[in-house]
Image (cartoon, helix red, strand yellow):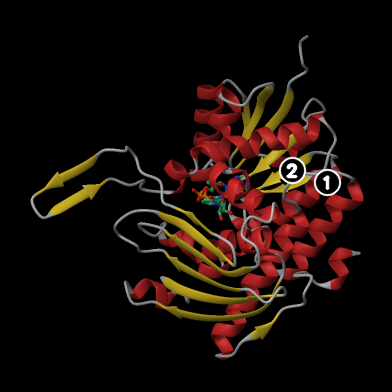
Amino acid sequence: MSVRPIRIGVAGLGRMGRVHAENLAHRVPDVELTRVVDVVEETARAAGERLGAAWSTDVEELLRDPALDGVVIAGPTATHAPMIEQAAAHGKHVLCEKPLSLELDATVRAVQAARAAGIKLQMGFHRRFDPDWAAVAERIAAGELGEAYLLRISLRDQAPPGVEFLRGSGGIFVDVAIHALDAARWLLGEVEEVAAFGAATSDAVFAEIGDLDTAIVQLRFASGALGVIDASRVAGYGYESSAEVMGSRATLRLDNHRRTHVERLAPGASAKDRVGDFVERYRHAYLLELEAFADAIREDREPAVTGEDALAAFVLAQACDEALRERRTVQVPTSGAPQEARA
Ligand SMILES: NC(=O)c1ccc[n+]([C@@H]2O[C@H](COP(=O)([O-])OP(=O)(O)OC[C@H]3O[C@@H](n4cnc5c(N)ncnc54)[C@H](O)[C@@H]3O)[C@@H](O)[C@H]2O)c1
């Protein structure tokens, strides 16, 4: 039986938008990459021609297309919230890259606009779709760990993105650690207290633009468990994405991925290779999140990770900023989200 393809467009064709557009065009079953948009005409044209999709420099044109079911929003962070509101007005479902916004009000408005319009709003927290992280979540939910005592997540980029990106990123907590903050809530439930330390010692540019290159976050969950997240933009040796959840009956350890499983052994030393960045590490998860988005549209069900999850992770990231700035621990409402957004 033939299935009607879900027709999806991509807005923003930089690092992440290209990954999504290529996946939609070639790898996601029963999906059609219908349109691509970028404000840079040459970028839009090149992607459209290469991937066999209509292209333009105008998101409004994409959203007006009656044939389109949904859009992947992958432009700079400042464009996400207004685009979600535009998509909601046109009744188009959204998969939005993280973070949803750098402003609490704009985040709340976008989440509410999506709910009011009845569109699906899935957030690009791709760890939720990664088979390793999903296995950890399933085992915790099945009670294999007993009582969870401690969560440790390391999230380190080998090298920072360009200065222009850094300027608009919102800083290490909302841009980088937010993936770990979402994973923490997903695995062990709501967080009620955070503390944070940060440093910017690798390059003067971080201090100039008010960002950090290295940070540590401590979490206290409502369950009583503790958590620690370390995040870096300058790991140098490679991309690190690892975690541990220690419990009363068992501990789960989620290791880094390796490019190959070949180990070089020489006198007194051995060496293993490792993945270089998030695109390489999470190649499969980026594909699975798009499949899940198309399934949510096709089957008319709630996405596995929603706008409310984006809001809750953002509130935690803001609490980290506050904790660092004010050199104190910060209490977070146990819902992880302000009251008005949950109404
Ligand atoms: N999930 C992840 O692992 C992950 C990884 C990296 C980045 N991100 C997020 O993805 C988003 C994009 O990051 P990136 O690294 O791809 O950025 P990027 O700078 O590489 O690309 C952004 C693209 O958007 C285009 N653009 C700018 N304004 C636009 C507009 N109004 N409409 C359409 N296109 C517009 C730019 O021309 C550029 O091509 C950011 O929010 C970032 O936080 C997520």
For disc 2, the marked residue is: 94
Furthest residue toward front: 249
The residue that appears at 58% across and 25% down in the rendered structure is 25
Q: Quadrant of the N terminus?
A: top right
How many C-alpha atoms fall within 10 Å of the one at disc 1: few (<14), some, or many (≥20)? many
- In the picture, measured across the screen, residue 62 lies left or right of residue 89, that is left
N-terminal label among 2 and 1: 1
Q: Amino acid at mark 2?
A: Val
The picture places residue 294, in percent across and down from the top left corner, at 72, 32
Rendered-image quadrant of the C terminus:
bottom right
Q: Nearer the viewer, residue 69 or 332?
A: 332
Q: Residue furthest bottom?
A: 327
Name the residue located 14 percent from the left edge and 53 percent from the top edge.
269
Residue at numbered disc 1 = 88
Mark 2 burial class by Cα count in 10 Å: few <14, some 14-19, many 20+? many
Q: Which circle marks residue 235 in the picture?
A: none
Q: Are marks 2 and 1 in contact (CB under 8 Å)?
A: yes
Residue name at image x 74 percent, y 26 percent: 6
Q: Residue at the far left: name it.
A: 267
